[in-house]
Amino acid sequence: MITTEGLGKQFGDFWAVDGVTLHVEQGEVLALLGQNGAGKTTTVRMLTALLAPTRGWARVAGYDVVRDAAQVRASVGVLTEQHGLYMRMTGAEYLDFFGQVYRLDASGRQKRSRYLMEYFGLAEVTHQRIGEYSKGMRQKLALARALIHEPPVLLLDEPTSAMDPESARLVRDEIANLRSSQRAIVICTHNLAEAEVLADRIAIIYRGRVLLNDTLEALKRRVLGPVEYEVKLSTAWDSAGLKLPAGITLNERKATSLRFRVEKPQIANPLLMQELASRKAPVVALQEVPRSLEQVYLKAMSQAVQR
Amino acid sequence: MVEKLRPVWLLARRELRDQFRDWRILFPLIVLTVLFPVLMDSVAGSAVEFVNDYGGNLVVDRLVPFSILIIGFFPITVSLVVALESFVGEKERGTIEPLLSTPFLDWQLYLGKLLVGVFFPLLASYIAIALYLFLVRYQDLNLPSIYQIVQLLTLTTAHAVLMVSGAIAVSTQSTSVRAANLLASFIVLPVAFLIQGESALLFWGNDQVLWMAVLAVSVLAALLVRVGLAHFQREYLLGREIDSLNLRWMWHTFWRSFFGDARSLWSWYRDEVGASLRALRVPLLLIVALMVAGGVLGFEWTAANVPAMLGETSAEDMGRIAEQLQMSAGVVSADLQFSFLTIFGHNMQAVMIMLFLGMFSFGVLGALVFVANMSVVGAALAFFQLFGFSPWTIFWAGLLPHGIFEFPAVMFASAAVLYLGAMLVTPDPTRTMGEVFIQALANWFKICVGLVLPMLAIAAAIETYITPNLLLKVMG
C-alpha cells in the first residue's frame, strides 16, 4: 500500500530526509517516531505528494507520488500538524466542502459527515462555527475531514495531541478499527504509549535517516537485548549454589528475586524451574520483565547521538 | 472542461462565503460602493458649475467618464487585500496544507483564488458605477454613451484582474501576510500611474487610444495570470518559512548564469553568448517584423497627415522644424557636434529604459519602446521627404553608416528583453520565480555586454566622426 525506496529530500544544502525506505501493508499501522525536525513531517509530505522527492521514489495506494500526484492525494486522508480548519465555517459546512472536494455525491456526503460527527461526539455542535469549538473538538473535526472520503491510506500527524483522555481513546479505537478495515496507516507521534498500542511496526527516524524499522518485539530484542525474566520468591532464599541451565545469563541476584536473560526461554525456562523446585526454592512467579517502547526509543537515540 | 472547472468554482464559493462573513472585507466594500458615488456626484456637480464659468466644455464632457474610472477603481483596491493574503494568509492560519493535500490541480487552486479576489470587488465596482450613473441622471450632466460605458467597464475589469493576478503572484512568493503587504506597493504604484495615464487619455478624448490602453492592460493582466500559473508551486508554499533577502545567493545565481562554464573571454563568447544568441532567434524575428511595421507606419502616417498640419504652421516654426530635422539626422554645425560619449550615453540610456520597462511588463513595454523609436525614424524620413530631401539619400548617408551597428545592437537588446518576458511566463517547476528572473536578467546582460555595448560604441564612433561629414557632403 505504501512503499518507499531511498526517499530523500534536500532543502538547499540540508538533507531533511535521507534515504528512507519503508513498506506499509494493507491493514498495517506504522508509527514514525523521532525528535522534532527528524524528517517525519517531510516524509509524510512526500507521501502526500506535497513535496517532490529529491531522490528515491515512493508509491502510495499503487500510485507514484511524482507521476500520479493527483491520484495519490485523492487516495490519502491527511491529518496535518496544525488542524487547518476554516474558523468561519460550521462543522457541517466544513465536512461538506471536503466531501465535495473528494467528489462524494450529496447524499453520500451528508451520510458520511453525520456519521463522523456523531462518532466523534460532535453532533451537538454540527451547526456551530468552528471558531467556537474547543481544541479537542477541532482535532476531532480535522480527523473527521481526513476520513470523509474513506481513503485507503491514512497519514496522521499527532492524531491525539490536545485531546482529553476520553477523546484520545476514541480516536485510538477508530484508528484500530480502520486498521482492521484493510487500510494502511502511518502515524507520526511523540506519544510513545500510543505508538506502542497502535503500531504494528515502528520506524525511528534520526536526522532524516531511518535508524530502526521493525515490529515492537523485534525492536526490543534488537535494542535492549534478549528478553529478561524474573523469578519472584516468597521469602529470602540463598541462591548461591543454583546451577543455571545453558543459555541463561544471570543479571541480578537478590534475596527474593532473580533476573536473567535467555536466548531460548521455551527450552531454558522449564529447566530452570525444575532446578529451583529440586532445591525447594519458594517460587511465587516466573515472568517476563516488561520493557517499554520508551526504553527502546531512548536507548536507540542515545546510541545514535554517540555515533 | 466544465468538470475540470468545477473545483475552481467549489474553492471560490467556499471563500466567497467566508468573505461574506468577514466584516473587515464587507465594510470597506459597502462604504466604497455606496458612499463614493454620492460623494463623486456631488463633487462633479460643483466642478461642472465651476468649469462652466470659464467655458471649459471639454473638461465637463470628460468629467463623468473620468469619475466612472475612479469610482470603479476604488472598490477593486479591496481585491488587493483579499488576493494578497490568498495563499500566504492560508499559510499563516495553517489551512494551506489540508487544502494542498486535496486532489485539486495547481491551476485549479490558482484560478479559484483569482476568482475569489476578483468577484466581490468587481461586483462592488459595477454597483458603484451603476449607482453613480443613476445619480448623474438627476444632475445637469450628460451621460456617457453606451460605447464609452462598455469601454470603462472593460478597463475596470482589466484593472481588477491585473491587480489580483499581481497580488496572487506576490502572495505565492511571500512567507507572511506582512511581507505580502509590503510588496503590495509594487502593484499599487504602477497601477496608480496607469490610472493617471488613462485619465489623461480620457481627457485627451481619443477613443481609439483608450481602446489600445484597454488592450494593453488586458494583455498585461493575462501575462500576469500566466506568470502566476507558470510559477505556482505547492512545494514552494510549504517549503519556505522566512523571507530573507539572500544577496549572496542572488549574486552567485547571476554570476553563474552570466559566465556559465567559460574559462576565457573567447569561450564565454563562443559558448555563453553564442547560446544566448541562438535562443533569441524567435524574438529577433518578431523584432524585425515590429521594426518594419513601426518604420512603415511612422513613415506612412507622417506622409499622410503632416502636410495638412504644416499648412497651418508659421514660417518661423517651419525653419525651427527643419533645423531640428537636420540635427536629428546628425547634420549639425561644427560647433554643435555631439560627442562620442553623448551619443553612446544616449543610446545606452535607451537600451536601459527598454530593459527597465520590459522587466515590469514581461518585455512588452520594452519592445514598444523599440517600435516607437522605429516609428520616429520612419516619421523623420517622411519629414525629410516633405522638406524636399530624398529619404533614401538620408537613409544611406545619414542612418546606414552607424545604423549597420546601431540597429542590430538595439534589435538584440529588444529581442533579449522579449526573451526575458517569455522566460518569466514559461512554466518551470524546477526553478523558483526569483531564480528564473535573475537568470533571465543575467541572460539579457550577457547579450548587452557581449554584443550590444561594443556595437553601440562602434556605432557612436561612426555617428560622431563619419556620418555628419558624409551627410554634409551628400546634402551639400
Image: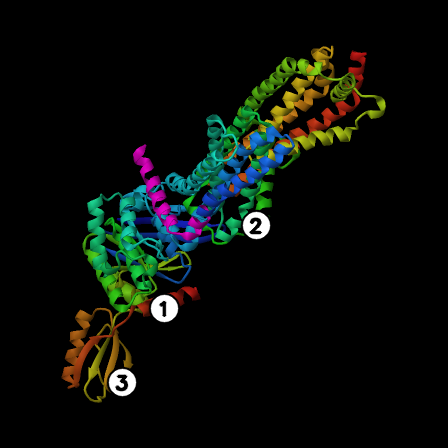
Indicate the position of residue A159 as horizontal and vertical percent values: 30, 60
Confirm whether the magenta stretch covers residue B59.
Answer: no
Secondary structure under tag 2 reads loop
Chain letter of disc 3? A
**Is label 3 or label 1 in front?**
1
Residue at 63% in and 13% down:
B304
| Front in this rendered view, residue B102 or A258 | B102
- Rendered view: B118 above or below B341: below
State how far apart marks 3 and 1 are (Cα): 27 Å
Most distant residue in the right direction: B335
- Circle 3 is placed at which residue position? A254
Residue at 84% in and 22% down:
B334
- Circle 1 is placed at which residue position? A298
**Picture quadrant of residue B199:** top right
Crowdedness near tag 2: few (<14), some (14–19) or many (≥20) residues, C-alpha within 10 Å: few
Give the prevailing secondary structure in the magenta stretch.
Answer: helix
Residue at 64% in and 26% down:
B410
**Picture quadrant of residue B5:** top left
Q: Can I make out residue A116 in this image?
A: yes
Q: Are marks 3 and 1 in contact (CB under 8 Å)?
A: no
Indicate the position of residue B403 as horizontal and vertical percent values: 69, 20
Q: Are marks 2 and 3 in contact (CB under 8 Å)?
A: no
- Residue B246 is marked as 2
- Rendered view: A252 above or below B175: below
Badge 2 amino acid? Asn
**Picture quadrant of residue B93:** bottom left
- Rendered view: A158 above or below B24: below
Secondary structure under tag 1 reads helix
Q: In this picture, which residue range is highlighted in magenta?
A: B1-29
